[in-house]
Amino acid sequence: MKKLIADKDAERVAPGTKKWKVDKLVQELADLREELADREEQLANIPKHMELAANFEWGGDLGGSDETIIARLHDKPTFVTHYPRDCKAFYMKRNEQDHRVVNNLDLLAPEGYGEIIGGSQREDSLEVLLERMKEEKLATEPYEWYLDLRRYGTVPHGGFGLGVERTVAWLCGLKHIRETIPYARMMGKMYP
């Protein structure tokens, strides 16, 4: 890639190169340099990712680096399910077969785009919900409205969140999520 950059740079400064061609080469060079920097950063992170993977202990939550490691192992979106109960929100339902985990999922996009969907089955038992809140040392007063949903009738249900911008970035192959946000906040950009 460095040779390609050098060749394009030489073509850009060559005598007689048309203005439109120079402009095009400048943009291509910027894109190539950015891609090279991304690849160099990925390469530099390999030892860190290997150390994180080797030292990962059951019971911990996955961080962004952990998700990157998993996503890079696959060329398609990958579901990660049944996270340890202690690292997840109090409202996630315990798994019936293994009370150490909850019934949840994350959908990780390949190529380093990260989590695009996160969801879980919600706890529908008021008693279990109160027990879990006590374990987490959460005051019940701010959650009375939520507890009322269980007190006065509920059904087994779940919920999820979809990261629209991250999904669009992955589907379109965009390098930065800011390219998917209609009115992104960026340095020097005051108006849409």
Image: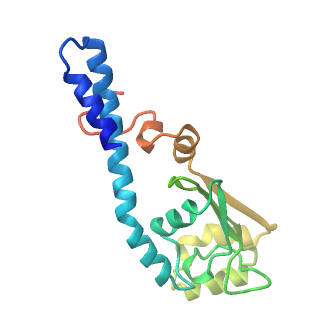
Decide which of 190, 173 is in the foreground and name it.
Answer: 173
Q: Quadrant of residue 151?
A: bottom right
| Whether residue 13 is situated above or below residue 155 in the rendered picture | above
| Whether residue 96 is situated above or below residue 113 in the rendered picture | below
Q: Quadrant of residue 131?
A: bottom right
Decide which of 43, 119 is in the foreground and name it.
Answer: 43
Residue 47 lies, in percent from the top left, at 39, 72
Residue 76 lies, in percent from the top left, at 65, 53
Residue 42 lies, in percent from the top left, at 40, 58
Can residue 6 be seen in the rendering of this structure? Answer: yes
Decide which of 190, 53 is in the foreground and name it.
Answer: 53
Q: Quadrant of residue 178?
A: top left
**Residue at image x 20%, y 20%?**
14
**Residue at image x 58%, y 75%?**
88
**Residue at image x 58%, y 71%?**
143
Decide which of 130, 30 is in the foreground and name it.
Answer: 30
Query: In what quadrant of the picture does the C terminus appear?
Result: top left
